[in-house]
Image (spheres, rainbow, N blue to C red):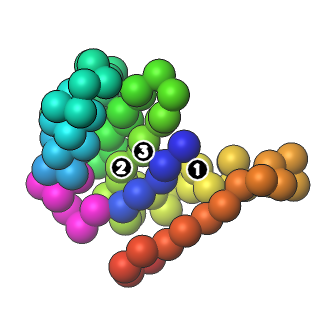
Amino acid sequence: MVIASAHSQRHVSAVADHLLRTWKNSGYGLASVEGLAGGDWVLIDTGDIIVHLFRPETRLFYNLEKMWLTSDFKNTKSVFFGDH
């Protein structure tokens, strides 16, 4: 699972669009996507990988990291790039 932030609704949509095009052009087929029109939270499901793209405020509100980063997930690794 990938959880990432983008600076604005436009940025969230642009990153999601880029990921979807790259996935398809790499020959992996189509991915399912939800929330692309709204731009606050986009979910991309490739079957093997789930990508959550958020605006910073939306990411703080839903706080998926808290739900998934528990002691049950000892092999979970968090990597932060840029401003978080």
Q: Are marks 3 and 2 in contact (CB under 8 Å)?
A: yes
The stretch drawn in magenta includes residue 7? yes
Task: Tell me which amino acid carries mark 2.
Answer: Leu
Q: Nearer the viewer, residue 18 or 28?
A: 28
C-alpha separation, residue under disc 3 versus residue under disc 2: 4 Å
Residue under numbered circle 2: 53
Q: Is residue 23 above or below residue 31?
A: below
Residue under numbered circle 1: 64
C-alpha separation, residue under disc 3 versus residue under disc 1: 9 Å
Badge number at residue 75: none
Badge number at residue 52: 3
Task: Tell me which amino acid carries mark 1.
Answer: Leu
Left or right for 47, reference 26: right
Instruction: Return the x and y of residue 62 as percentages of the image width and height.
Output: 52, 50
The stretch drawn in magenta includes residue 8? yes
Q: Residues within 10 Å of mark 3 (few under 14, many from 20)?
A: many
C-alpha separation, residue under disc 2 versus residue under disc 1: 11 Å
- Residue at 48% over, 34% down: 49
Nearer mark to the viewer, of 3 and 1:
3
- Residue at 37% over, 79% down: 82
- Residue 51 sits in which quadrant? top left
Instruction: Return the x and y of residue 69 as percentages of the image width and height.
Output: 72, 55
| Pointer 2 or 1: first along the chain | 2
Which stretch is magenta? 6-12
Q: Are marks 3 and 1 in contact (CB under 8 Å)?
A: yes
Instruction: Return the x and y of residue 42 as percentages of the image width and height.
Output: 32, 40
Q: Quadrant of the N terminus?
A: top right
